[in-house]
Image: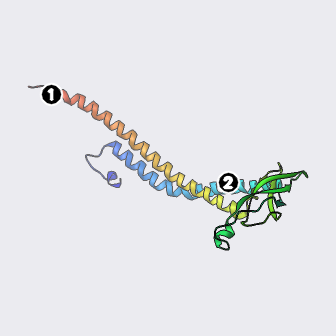
């Protein structure tokens, strides 16, 4: 790309335009990336922090009772068994004081009648806990990283579209030039 910027009698104006656009995009994308990451990361952090506050206000932690034995893990006592949760039927009281039955994820091998803690929404359904500060932070960082990739993808797409347009213009110019030149080559003197 940079060799197109040097003086050359065979270099067309389209080649210079393509090279300059490529150079500008090559410099602009990395320069714009930090600003875009900060803007998108901040907006995402505010969004997820607001969502976490809303979730904390509309969800509450309550005790539920197992209505059946929870499944046993194939490897009891393993690190995997401590992290694994199995669905089981539970009974709990919703925020309006009604007794409900639902399926919740519980630790393996809990016997029937065991008490487990579950999160319940205002609609009385079992739900996930509110977003933690770490989850808010990681989602904001993920959004910022995706935005950074988007800047570079946009720059690459812009360069690709520019190359395509310039190629079409070159082909059209070559067709026109050939239309003028072809009669001199194909007719006999």
Residue shown at 37% from the left, 40% from the top: 166
Label 2: element kind: helix
Could you tell me how far apart the alpha carbons at marks 1 and 2 are, in whole angstroms? 66 Å
Locate residue 116, reporting x and y percent: 80, 64
Q: Nearer the viewer, residue 34 or 91?
A: 91
Mark 2 closeness class: few <14, some 14–19, many ≥20 residues within 10 Å: some
Residue shown at 67% from the left, 72% from the top: 76
Q: Compared with residue 171, is residue 67 higher up or lower down, i.e. above or below?
A: below
Is 106 displayed left or right of 175 in the figure?
right
Q: Nearer the viewer, residue 122 or 72?
A: 72
Mark 2 highlights which residue? 43
Q: Residue lying at the far right in this picture: please name it.
A: 97
Locate residue 96, reporting x and y percent: 90, 50
Could you say which disc has been placed on residue 151 in the image?
none
Q: Nearer the viewer, residue 142 or 76?
A: 76
Locate residue 134, reporting x and y percent: 69, 64
Q: Nearer the viewer, residue 73 or 27?
A: 73
Locate residue 53, reporting x and y percent: 78, 56
Q: Residue lying at the far left in this picture: please name it.
A: 189
Mark 1 closeness class: few <14, some 14–19, many ≥20 residues within 10 Å: few
Which tag, 1 or 2, sits closer to the chain's start?
2
Residue shown at 75% from the left, 58% from the top: 88
Label 1: element kind: helix
Is 14 displayed left or right of 96 in the figure?
left
Question: Where does the C terminus fall, quadrant-wise?
Answer: top left
Mark 1 highlights which residue? 186
């Amino acid at each position: 790309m940079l060799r197109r910027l040097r003086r050359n009698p065979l270099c067309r104006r389209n080649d210079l335009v393509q090279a300059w656009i490529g150079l500008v995009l090559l410099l602009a994308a990395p320069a714009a990336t930090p600003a875009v990451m900060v803007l998108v990361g901040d907006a995402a952090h505010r969004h997820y922090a607001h969502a976490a506050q809303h979730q904390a206000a509309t969800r509450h932690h309550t005790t539920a009772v197992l209505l059946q034995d929870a499944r046993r893990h194939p490897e009891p006592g393993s690190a995997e068994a401590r992290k694994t949760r199995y669905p089981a039927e539970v009974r709990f009281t919703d925020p309006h004081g009604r007794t409900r039955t639902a399926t919740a994820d519980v630790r393996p091998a809990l016997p029937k009648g065991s008490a487990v803690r579950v999160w319940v929404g205002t609609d009385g359904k079992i739900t996930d806990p509110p977003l933690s500060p770490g989850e808010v932070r990681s989602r904001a960082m993920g959004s910022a990283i995706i935005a950074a990739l988007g800047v570079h993808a946009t720059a690459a797409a812009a360069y690709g579209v520019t190359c395509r347009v310039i190629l079409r213009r070159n082909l059209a110019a070559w067709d026109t030039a050939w239309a003028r030149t072809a009669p001199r080559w194909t007719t006999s003197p």
